[in-house]
Amino acid sequence: YVDNCAQLPDALQEQICSHCPALTRLTAFGQLTDTALTNLSAHCGRLQIASLSGCRGLTDSGLAPFLQRCSSLVTCDICCNDFVGDASVLAVVRHCPALRALAIGGNASFTDASAVAIAQYAGSRLQVLHLGRRTSITNAGVTHLAQHCTELYSLLVTSQPNRIRGDLLAKWVSKCPGLEFLDVGRCASTKVVLAAAAKSCPRLQLLNLYEAQIHVEALQEVARGCPLLRTVAVLRHSLGAKDLQELKQEFPLLDVQYTDVTIPYWAKFSYTFTDPM
């Protein structure tokens, strides 16, 4: 297990990992480079968790070959790397048959090609899929994902405002009865998405509607249809005091959290990107 290795020089990272032939987890939030990954690639055969987000020196040229060698990888987070995109997604979904959790996003280099690759090579086995902001994935890409990624228990789709159609998300959600965590913040027509969740997702526990248009009737419907729902996160002031009071009266166990920022996904569902499933 190597954590925060971006604070170490490339040569020292390689020297440490050379003494860890059973390395199973690698996290690096920061300045991990292509050179460092090249040095580490000889020691990644048993790697199960790779959290490689926010690494400004990382590109597809270094990451894609590295992921091709991580045949035991279960969890992969490659969000917010400015020069990482479709090529790395293709590498991880094609060469990591144990993959169960994938997080991408943070730049426009993730296109519909990423969505098609995910659907084709990993759709039937993924349990966690997080599509973060600023991707170039369109309704066409979501259509592919909705057809194949139906075993999810955690789904995050924080698109640009109104980019992804609500009816497409609703169809996707309706095909995922095992969902426990759903984030459709900033997506269009969340009312139809919530209606789909109310009918099809009885295990739903956490719902994030950050920057989404809130309809209290839709929240009541999803709370009735999802008896395990305990947390709903909304943007501050998006629900009036009267609406909140009505929810509390009917659903005393429901915690409505006001937030000014996107809900900390990794904190709420930390097991998603820490422990192999």
Image (cartoon, grey):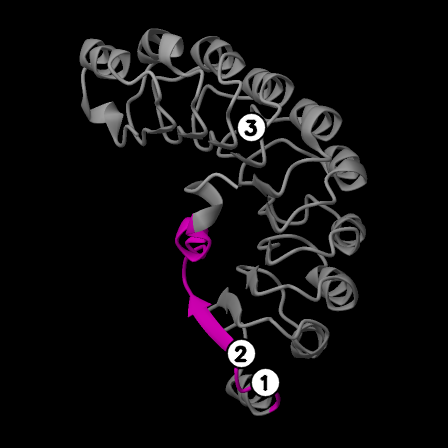
Q: Is residue 88 magenta?
A: no
Where does the image place residue 50, in percent across and percent down from the top left?
42, 28
The residues colored magenta run: 250-270
Vertical comparison of 277 with 269: above or below: above
Q: CA distance from mark 3 to mark 2?
A: 36 Å
* Residue position for label 1: 251
Name the quadrant containing residue 229. bottom right
Q: Which mark identifies residue 254? A: 2
Question: Can you see residue 236?
Answer: no
Q: Residue at x 51, y 70 (%)?
A: 231
Q: CA distance from mark 3 to mark 1?
A: 40 Å
Kind of residue sitting beneath label 2? Leu
**Mark 3 vs 2: CB contact within 8 A:** no
Name the quadrant containing residue 236. bottom left
Q: CA distance from mark 1 to mark 2?
A: 5 Å
Which secondary structure, mark 1? loop
> Comparing marks 3 and 2, which lies closer to the viewer?
2
Sequence-first disc among 3 and 1: 3
Kind of residue sitting beneath label 1? Phe
Vertical comparison of 42 with 254: above or below: above
Q: Left or right: where does residue 71 sit relative to residue 137?
A: left
Number of numbered discs: 3
Instruction: State which quarter of the image contains the N terminus.
Output: top left
Q: Left or right: where does residue 39 sit relative to residue 200?
A: left
At label 1, counting other C-alpha atoms closer than 10 Å, the crowd grade (few under 14, some 14-19, many 20 or more) is: some
Where does the image place residue 226, in percent across and percent down from the top left?
68, 71
Name the quadrant containing residue 136. top right
Which secondary structure, mark 2? loop
Vertical comparison of 79 with 45: above or below: below
The residue at the far bottom in this view is 249
Sequence-first disc among 3 and 2: 3
